[in-house]
Image: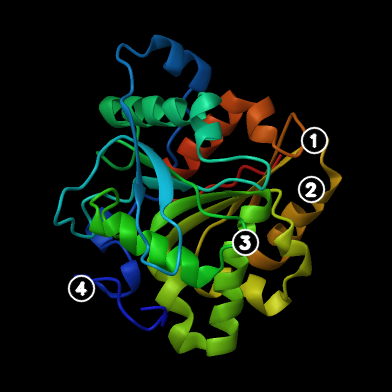
Amino acid sequence: ENDASTPLHDMPWGGGQVPSEMAPSSEMVPPIDAEQAIEDATSDVAITSDAVSLGDEYDDLPYLHCGPEFGTHPNPGDGAGRELLLLHGAAFRASTWKESGILEGLCLLGRQAGASGASTMTADLSVTALDLPVSADALYLNKAFKSLWERGIISGEAMFIVTPSASGSSMMSAASFAVSKGAEDASKILRRLVRGWIPVAAGAVLSASSDALEVFIELEIPILAIYGDQDAKGKKSSERLSDEAGASTLELEGRHPCYLDSPNEFIRAVTDFIDNGGNMDVRR
């Protein structure tokens, strides 16, 4: 099961890619005012919590979720490309996303976009915050993805993934794995799991090989690299992603965990990135 060549499930299209009829429009979706949209929301967001089992080899992983779930027999495509996975940095937990209000804000804004028709997709945003350890490699992430799919929390199609700080090592592990195994195996984890990557000051980028970074360009995985204006190392890692992995970059006011210092700006940037299928340039 740890072999990356083992399929997670039978997908109706190869590599976890969304069919052309479900692909985002090339026309840019205008940004929504996150603070005002959340303030104007007329209903609360239901946040559920539970844990998924990854077998005897790993501890159970707690998770929080808001937005659509996909039932006992989910099929790729159910999420219409609007699924987000939130990992966390070494000093935090999945619960930080709830305590900060960001988890609720992402679902509220995602619901507003879908209801208004502003989004390129019609589905509400499905958001899962997972307590994946920051030491997790690509195979660990792969097993977590499979377990969430088996529970019907996610649809099984590639997701947008936020990796603050040290949690970015799981993505760089996947990229390094792709390089070591060659192009044929590159899609086994990265393309199947990742529709778009949103690293926040990912330190692992600074020690990664150029070949690993270039994999994201080869697989056409869009990246939005976010960092705080008080975080020199985060800026450096974001600039390297821009130079070698084709990332768009965004500077927010704040420290290393800038999403906690500028939550509304972070929510808006993430939802804009998702609504445009990663096809945007938000360099600032």
Residue tagged 3: 135
Relative height, residue 6 to residue 202 (above, below): below
Residue tagged 2: 235
Q: Earlier in the sequence, mark 3 or mark 4?
A: 4
Front disc: 3 or 4: 3
Q: What amino acid type should be assigned to the residue bearing mark 3? A: Ser
C-alpha separation, residue under disc 4 versus residue under disc 1: 44 Å
Whole-percent x and y of residue 154? 29, 51
**Residue 226 left/right relative to 68:** right
> 219 and 63: which one is in front?
63
Q: What secondary structure is found at the residue carrying circle 3?
A: loop
Q: Earlier in the sequence, mark 4 or mark 1?
A: 4
Whole-percent x and y of residue 270? 51, 39
Q: Residues within 10 Å of mark 3 (few under 14, many from 20)?
A: few
Residue tagged 1: 229
Front disc: 2 or 4: 4
Asked if disc 2 and disc 1 are in contact, CB closer than 8 Å, the reply is: yes
Q: Earlier in the sequence, mark 2 or mark 1?
A: 1
Whole-percent x and y of residue 234? 77, 48
Q: What secondary structure is found at the residue carrying circle 1?
A: loop
Front disc: 2 or 3: 3
Relative height, residue 138 to residue 132 (above, below): below
Residue tagged 4: 10
**Residue at point 77%, 69% (across, down):** 207
Q: What secondary structure is found at the residue carrying circle 4?
A: loop
Q: What amino acid type should be assigned to the residue bearing mark 2? A: Lys
Q: Earlier in the sequence, mark 2 or mark 3?
A: 3
**Residue at point 39%, 67% (across, down):** 56
Q: What amino acid type should be assigned to the residue bearing mark 1? A: Asp
C-alpha separation, residue under disc 2 versus residue under disc 1: 8 Å
C-alpha separation, residue under disc 1 versus residue under disc 3: 26 Å
Q: Earlier in the sequence, mark 2 or mark 4?
A: 4
